[in-house]
Image (cartoon, grey):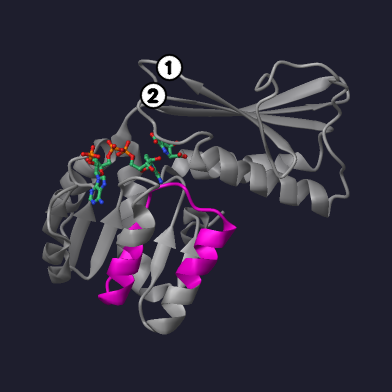
């Protein structure tokens, strides 16, 4: 049995993760911790799952690593600097492993992968992410990561920026720029999490779209991470490393 603790256990995703861990035959939920609860309960766990908030996730991770606990992290807000900080902590605590994934949905991971594959073949690319209005961060972690992957593929193919002759625009009208890729964030009641990657070329467009219809969709990926984390040394970024893509 893998002893699992959940941080953010009363949150929208945390609740689903707790249910999934309790239903898994090879796991035991030993701690369900949310804001205001003492983290010490997590020391009964081997693996801690974090779905909290971008403002607190670094402190949580530092605490887990320094207590020798593996961490599977869904919370967003990671940039290159934060990832480097985590790598530094892990160097000081050999044997502790961390998986950080901006999206644990299998379909979402495939959407990012397909977008990365397609990027080299099109002149233009833009990303539209659409989420529930209670989301803390914009753009989403998934959109940021998609933009990074697409930008990397375009650079490798020797492609310059997407064509754009705009010389006059209201601030924000063209979205945010992530490594040269435009990302637009929509917040709308009734939505959960959705993303479109729009690609345009000579006389054709390709739209790659993913829709999250239930937060339970994140749990198979989280459980996969929990099962595999002990054999993934150091820091792993992205669920794609655990899939056969
Ligand atoms: N990687 C993935 O697949 C996915 C990632 N996410 C990300 O996960 C994060 C959480 O999303 P979501 O569940 O919707 O958010 P919620 O706000 O619903 O849940 C977060 C929970 O964490 C609690 N919390 C805040 N601070 C702490 C703390 N220091 N220690 C323990 N618990 C704390 C919150 O309490 P309170 O409300 O009182 O502040 C809340 O109950 C976000 O960054 C989101 O983008 C979401 C979906 C999928
Ligand atoms: O906050 C959310 O809801 C989600 N957050 C993640 C992100 O920022 O990419 C994953 C998914 O989009 C849902």
Q: If the image is split into quadrants, where does the N terminus sit?
A: bottom left
Q: Residue at x 58, y 58 (%)?
A: 80
Q: Is residue 67 magenta?
A: yes
**Residue at the spot 47% in from the left edge and 39% down from the top edge:** 107
Disc 2 + disc 1, Cβ < 8 Å: yes
| Relative horizontal placement of residue 90, taking residue 203 as reference (left or right) | left
Q: Is residue 93 above or below residue 201?
A: below
- Residue 201 location in percent, x, y? 84, 27
Q: What SS does tag 2 mark? A: loop
Q: Nearer the viewer, residue 74 or 226?
A: 74
Could you tell me residue 155's position as x and y percent? Answer: 81, 50
Disc 2 marks which residue? Answer: 132
Q: Which residue is mark 1?
A: 188
Check disc 1: other Cα within 10 Å, few if <14, some if 14-19, many if 20+.
few
Q: Is mark 2 within 8 Å of ligand 2?
A: yes
Label 1, secondary structure: give it: loop
Q: Which quadrant does ligand 2 occupy?
A: top left
Using the image, determine if residue 163 lies above or below residue 155.
above
Magenta-drawn segment: 61-87
Quarter containing the C terminus: bottom right
**Position of residue 51 measured from the top left corner of the image (x, y, whole percent):** 31, 48
Question: Residue 96 in magenta?
Answer: no
* Residue 242 coordinates in the image, percent (x, y): 46, 60
Q: CA distance from mark 2 to mark 1?
A: 5 Å
Q: Is residue 70 visible?
A: no
The residue lying toward the viewer, choosing from 210 and 166, is 166
């Amino acid at each position: 049995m893998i002893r699992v603790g959940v941080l953010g256990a009363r949150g929208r995703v945390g609740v689903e993760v707790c249910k999934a861990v309790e239903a898994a035959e090879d796991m035991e939920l030993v701690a369900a911790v949310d804001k205001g609860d003492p983290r010490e309960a997590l020391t009964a766990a081997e693996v801690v799952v974090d779905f909290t908030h971008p403002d607190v996730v670094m402190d949580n991770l530092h605490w887990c690593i320094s207590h020798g606990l593996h961490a599977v992290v869904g919370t967003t807000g990671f940039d290159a600097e934060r990832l480097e900080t985590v790598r530094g902590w892990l160097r000081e605590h050999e044997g502790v492993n961390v998986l950080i994934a901006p999206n644990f949905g299998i379909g979402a991971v495939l959407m990012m992968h397909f977008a990365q594959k397609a990027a080299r073949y099109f002149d233009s690319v833009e990303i539209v992410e659409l989420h529930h209005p209670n989301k803390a961060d914009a753009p989403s972690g998934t959109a940021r990561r998609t933009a990074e992957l697409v930008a990397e593929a375009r650079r490798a193919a020797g492609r310059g920026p997407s064509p754009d002759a705009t010389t006059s625009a209201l601030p924000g009208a063209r979205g945010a720029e992530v490594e040269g890729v435009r990302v637009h964030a929509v917040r709308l009641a009734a939505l959960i999490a959705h993303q479109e990657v729009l690609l345009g070329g000579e006389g054709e467009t390709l739209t790659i779209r993913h829709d999250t219809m239930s937060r339970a969709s994140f749990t198979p990926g989280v459980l996969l991470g929990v099962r595999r984390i002990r054999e993934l040394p150091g820091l792993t970024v992205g669920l794609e490393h655990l899939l056969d893509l």
